[in-house]
Amino acid sequence: MVYSPGFIAQCEQEKLHLSGAIQPHGVLLVCDRQGLVSHVSANVADWLGENATPAFLLGQALPHFLHEVDASAASLNRGERYVGQCHLAEQEFDVVVSDNGEQRLFELYPVTAHARPLMAPVTSQPLPEDKAELAKQCEQLLQTLQEMSGFDRVLYYRFLPEGDGEVTAEVGREAGMGCYLGLRFPASDIPQIARELYLQNPWRTIPHGKAEPVAIVSREEGAVPNLSWVDLRSASPIHVEYMTNMGVSAAVSLPIVLGGELDALISCHAATPRQLTVSQLSAMHAEVNAFNLRLRDYKARRRLQVFDGLQHRFGQAQAVMMRHGSLEAAWPELSQWLLYTFQADGAVLTIGDTHYTQGSVLSMEALAALKAQVGQDDRSVWISEQLAHDCPGLPLTAVAGVAVVRDLALDPHHTAELYLCREETLYQVTWGGSPDKPVDYRQDGRGIAPRRSFEAWVEQRFGHSRPWSPSARLYLLKLRALLQKAKTLPEEKTASGSR
Ligand code: BLA
């Protein structure tokens, strides 16, 4: 996929956390370590009373009505948040307090009585038994979130290893906002800096994309506070334009984090502006969290099952090696085991200049060229699922992917290598709009704008094999150890026989 470097740089350079502005549905007050107000949003008097102007508040102690919340949040560390309430005259506020390492930030959200929802109980579900059950629970989660939020459409947007994302579940298609299920979107639709922020926050809300941002006024000129943990932070103009192109006015995203990495984003869309209260968001977050924990446990259990299965298979391979005593003799049986266990279409064993083959393999010419190229690499296991790309110039036919296990040294005079081959698989990837055109250049020359078309766009991918699993490398190392150990068995037998 081709993106212009200038475009990537422009997206990635936007310092979202230093935007110097907030969205207008709340008020921001920032205190320095002395407890004096260092920044306020310019709309502060609209909510706190006409005397509470930035000029009046800046440099003063934190206003009295925030003291109780401040005391409750006393032990906050950098990046942590505390949710509380406070009153000023007749007005009630939800207050989210966070600490950015230099300052303490108070987000105030005015609450109207009718907006306060009943807390939905966290749905209790059993640990899913299989993939189908997991998918069902995921869809149920989206439905629950749609009911709790009143948003029109909720998507489960799953990240792929290369950073692109795919919509794997969707509810609310009947809202008439288009169907995104099964579509893939390029990594650049969510810049790295935004992903990092989603990793650190329980939700991100943009209740009214087109609402005019409110400037943050500083006591010291030019000092902008770090808003990494402040949901009120203004929305990126380029993302607002993207939302508009999608027909979306309001968005809420909730991250799914696994092993410290952003695995997915649950994205709620509304066609008209829509604001949720902090307690509604907290209740939604609790639902997402409960699902996240089940997903984590499901994956851990699946890994254990795969591991147990492989332990069993490796036991079989060991028995084969014991029966035959040498790699050469074991090959007819061992190669069948290899194809089955590693889901390969073919396998080649080379011992010195001799080749033993099984199934669909690389030509001898391609093998020699590959051997020369892989010889430069000092890793014991070398993997490719796109040989034409990774080793240009190889005379390839059916095979497009290979896993090489190197240095199965038999003795100082004979080295052995194993090649597991996978044939080419034709891939079709359906993108939400052409991935080669993630942006349009503005006609007025003011730089880039997000893409306007989300129509399904089909890409045919050539030269790929089915991907090797992330744990293939580990299992191949285990295989290498097993084969190296097994080849010494005949000697051991002799040794024990002569005793
Ligand atoms: C943020 N982009 C996002 C977010 C999503 C997407 C989910 C999180 C914020 C939110 O909740 O809206 C992308 N939304 C999608 C996709 C689907 C969807 C793919 O519903 C599919 C159905 N965006 C661009 C380009 C740039 C860009 C070209 O398309 C860069 C110049 C930037 N996207 C961008 C930025 C944010 C973002 C800066 C962060 C917005 C913020 O948090 O303020």
Image: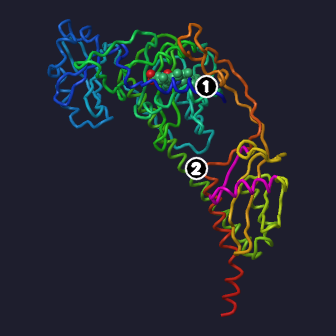
Residue 233 lies left or right of residue 97; in this view the side is right
Q: Measuring from the top left, give residue 200's x and y in whole percent.
A: 40, 34
**In the foreground, 151 or 431:** 431
Q: Does the residue labelled 2 lie within 8 Å of ligand 1?
A: no
Mark 1 highlights which residue?
Answer: 4
Please name the amino acid that badge 1 sits on. Ser
Q: Give the range drawn in magenta.
A: 366-386
Residue 269 lies left or right of residue 355; in this view the side is left
Residue 361 lies left or right of residue 66; in this view the side is right
Tell me the residue at 41%/27% (across/down): 120
Where is residue 497, by image quadrant?
A: bottom right
**In the foreground, 13 or 68:** 13
On-image quarter of the C terminus:
bottom right
Please name the amino acid that badge 2 sits on. Arg
Residue positioned most to the bottom: 499
Q: Measuring from the top left, give residue 86's x and y in whole percent.
A: 22, 21
| Disc nearer the start of the sequence (2/1) | 1
Mark 2 highlights which residue?
Answer: 302
Label 1, residues with CA under 10 Å away: few <14, some 14-19, many ≥20: few
Residue 280 lies left or right of residue 42; in this view the side is right
**In the foreground, 386 or 143:** 386
In this rendering, the count of numbered labels is: 2
Q: 370 above or below 185?
A: below
Viewer can see residue 413? yes
Residue 380 within the segment the image draws in magenta: yes
Viewer can see residue 148? no
Q: Measuring from the top left, give residue 171's x and y in whole percent.
A: 58, 23
Tell me the residue at 58%/11% (across/down): 442
Please tell me whether mark 1 sits on a helix, a strand or a loop.
loop
Label 2, residues with CA under 10 Å away: few <14, some 14-19, many ≥20: some
